[in-house]
Every structure is written in C-alpha cells, then in structure tokens.
Amino acid sequence: MNDLIKRFLDKKNVFAVVGASRNTEKYGFKIYQSLKEAGYTVYPVNPNNQEIDGDKCFPSLRDLPVKPDVVNLVVPPEITEKIVEECLNVGVKNVWMQPGSESQKALDFCSKSGIKVLNGVCVMVEKNNLGGELYDG
C-alpha cells in the first residue's frame, strides 16, 4: 500500500476532491485546502457549490477542464458508488476513498473495472507522513 500511496501523492498528479465543501469545519474543505496549499493542482467538485476557497467549483467530474489523475472522495458511501462509475466513464484510474466514504460495492466495482483504490487512510495524514514533502517519484 505504501507504494500506491506514494504514486497517488506524486506531485505531478492532478487531484479532484469530490465532496469539497465551503464549510471550513468539514473534511471536504480541509482536504481540498490541504492539497492546494501543498502545491497540487486540485479541483473542487460539488454540485451544490459555485466556488470553494475562492476557486470555481465544478458540479461533476465531467465538467472539469482536465481529467484528474486522482479522485479523492469525501462523500457518503452511496454517493461514492455513483462517483466510481463516473470515474470509469471519464477514464479516471485512481480513486482515494477517505475513511467513511467507502463501501464494499464501490470497492468491488473498482476492482472489476481496473481502478486502483486507496481506502482506510486519509490523504492529509499520508501527505504529512511523507514529512510534509511532496513525493517526486
């Protein structure tokens, strides 16, 4: 799993945070801001917001200006199950399910579809475990 974490956290990767939030107390905001401050190119995705942290927010993965390398999910499991199907449809091959966003159905779908998945670990914690440095693999 450590190799997969390092590959996902490669500083060249473009992230999309699905479930990004304007509420600064929510993990959807904290994760988005953390990746942004670390120097990643990151897009917020939430159909209920126009902007987050001063940046344009996109209603879906299909609406992003580029295909992300990694989709980070900060949504309930039922939404995750829909988003992983969208990932397959837009060609995303790497999904990071934040703790609490995963479901067995979503994990099975990714496995059958050839989508690499990280789950049970938090992107902010793992980024910090790399000493706060961006991985340059």
Image (tube, rainbow, N blue to C red):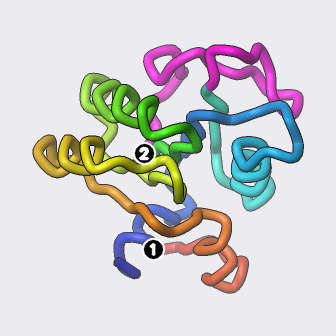
The residue tagged 1 is 6
| Amino acid at circle 1 | Lys
Q: For this rendering, which residue is in front, 124 or 106?
A: 106
| Amino acid at circle 2 | Asp
Q: Magenta stretch?
A: 46-69
In this rendering, the answer to whether 131 lies above or below 83 is: below
Question: How many numbered marks, from 0 up?
Answer: 2
Q: Residue at x 51, y 19 (%)?
A: 60
Q: Residue 131, located in which quarter of the rendered image?
A: bottom right
User: Where does the image place residue 132, in percent across and percent down from the top left?
Assistant: 72, 78
The quarter of the picture where the C terminus appears is bottom left
Q: CA distance from mark 1 to mark 2?
A: 13 Å
Q: Residue at x 66, y 32 (%)?
A: 44
The residue tagged 2 is 69
Is 65 magenta? The answer is yes
On screen, residue 67 versus residue 107, left or right, reads: right
Q: For this rendering, which residue is in front, 110 or 93?
A: 110
- Give the numbered dot on residue 97: none
Q: Residues within 10 Å of mark 2 (few under 14, many from 20)?
A: some
SS under mark 1: helix
On screen, residue 107 versus residue 16, left or right, reads: left
Q: For this rendering, which residue is in front, 52 or 99?
A: 99
Which SS type dominates the magenta stretch? loop
User: Where does the image place residue 66, in percent across and percent down from the top left?
Assistant: 49, 27
Q: Residue 74, located in which quarter of the rendered image?
A: top right
The quarter of the picture where the N terminus appears is bottom left
Residues under numbered marks 1 and 2 in contact, where contact means CB atoms less than 8 Å apart:
no
Is 92 magenta? The answer is no
